[in-house]
Structure formats: C-alpha cells, structure tokens
Amino acid sequence: QSALTQPASVSGSPGQSITFSCTGTSSDVGGYSYVSWYQQHPGKAPKLMIFDVSDRPSGVSNRFSGSKSGNTASLTISGLQAEDEADYYCSSYTSSSTYVFGTGTKVTVL
Amino acid sequence: EAQLVESGGGLVQPGGSLRLSCAASGFTFSNYYMHWVRQAPGKGLVWVSRTNREGSTTDYADSVKGRFTMSRDNAKNTLYLQMNSLRAEDTAVYHCARGHSYGYGVDIWGQGTMVTVSS
C-alpha cells in the first residue's frame, strides 16, 4: 500500500489558478472513481473538499474542482485566496478494500 | 452539529497496548461507515481502518493488520480502536472520521488523540 504521489509544494499568486496532481496505479486511482481531496491547516483536522473525483460537499467553494485521467487525479483551485494556503492530501479507495492517502502538497499563496 | 471526540491516547512502551475511543454526536451514528486515520508528527495522513455500519466488516492497512482491532457500539454511539503490540512507528495523532453518506470520502473528522510509543 504505497502512498499516492503528490508534488511536495505548489505556489501561486492571489487570483491565479493552480492545479496539482495525485498519481497512483490501476489498483487505486485508475481503477475507481473514488478519489477524494482534503485540506488541512496547521494544527487542524482535515476537511473534505472533493469526493468521488469531482463532487463537492455542501459548503465547499466552487473554486475547488477535481478531475481524473488514467492513474492520475488532479485538484484545481481557481481564484486563489490567502485562506487556501494549507496542506492538501488526496485519497483513493483500493482493490484491497482499503484506502490510501497521498504524500501531501503544501500550497503557498505568494 | 455532527461531532467526533477521541480519547484514550497517551504514552505507552513498545509492545504495550492502548484502547482509543471516539464518541459521536449530532448524527445517527449507526447509519455511517467509520474510519481511523493517523498522522505522525510533521508527517502526512495515513489510513488505518474502516468498519461498516453494523461493525460486521472491518478492513485494515497492512501496517496494523493483526495488531489493531476496530469495533463499534451503535447503542453507545462510540467507535473503538484496540491497539496491541505497539511500535515506535505507531506514534501519531489518531483521528476517527465519518464516511460520507453516499460517497467514498470522509466528511467529518475528530481533532484526534495523541499516541506516543516510547520507552
């Protein structure tokens, strides 16, 4: 159960759009439409931002969107805001009936 | 408001045991799958286990399989994690979390309880 691969860090200026990836295998990301994304601010519990690849929970800004192609999922943050600065983790259901998280991406708002 | 509150963490010696609890409130606990997720200090999230609504089926990460046992008491709205044969690498904040009602995400998280395995 190796962790999904995410870039360690991504940055952007306020108002810009950023996109970052989450790469797995055909046994997890590529095999199911069950990728979710979480935002975590320092010292806080994670918050669900996207589930089932592209669905947004109630209350999550539509500036956040998800997609998937093959074994790679992506999260896009549009109209970047200072409050978006946080760690982001992807997660996927796997063929072993387990879940796996990504390595995490630190988003910095310049 | 849906809420999860963990308890039971602490300092334990390698090879020891600990039982975590997670009290749920503000939602119908028995209607949801539940998860445990851990995070070592300064590190990323790691999925630990999941149980179905009845507690009849539970899945575990390979790293804890055979050592940890997840269970639930729907009458008490409480989730448990029995941790045996603890290792230094089990040191982490342990979060209980609620599975989304119809998707595969985890939508409600507790603040976590710290488990430190050290001699």
Image: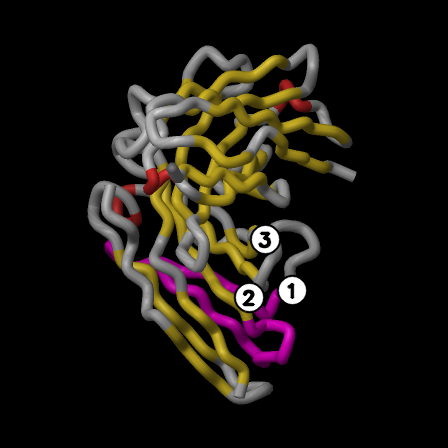
Q: Nearer the viewer, mark 2 or mark 3?
A: 3
Chain letter, disc 3 residue: A
Colour scheme in use: secondary structure
Q: Residue at x 44, y 59 (%)?
A: B42
Q: Residue at x 37, y 49 (%)?
A: A101
Q: Residue at x 43, y 22 (%)?
A: B17
Q: Is residue A105 visible?
A: yes
Residue at the disc numbered 3: A47
Type of the residue with mark 2:
Phe
Badges 2 and 3: C-beta atoms under 8 Å apart?
no
Q: Is residue A22 magenta?
A: no
Q: CA distance from mark 2 to mark 3?
A: 13 Å
Residue at the disc numbered 1: A61
Q: Earlier in the sequence, mark 2 or mark 3?
A: 3
Badges 1 and 3: C-beta atoms under 8 Å apart?
no
Badges 2 and 1: C-beta atoms under 8 Å apart?
yes
Pick the front one: B100 or A107: A107
Residue at the disc numbered 2: A64
Q: Could you tell whether A66 is left or right of A42 in the image? A: left
Q: Could you tell whether B6 is left or right of A37 in the image? A: right
Q: Residue B11's spot in the image, x, y percent?
A: 50, 36
Q: Which residues are magenta?
A: A61-85
Q: CA distance from mark 1 to mark 3?
A: 12 Å
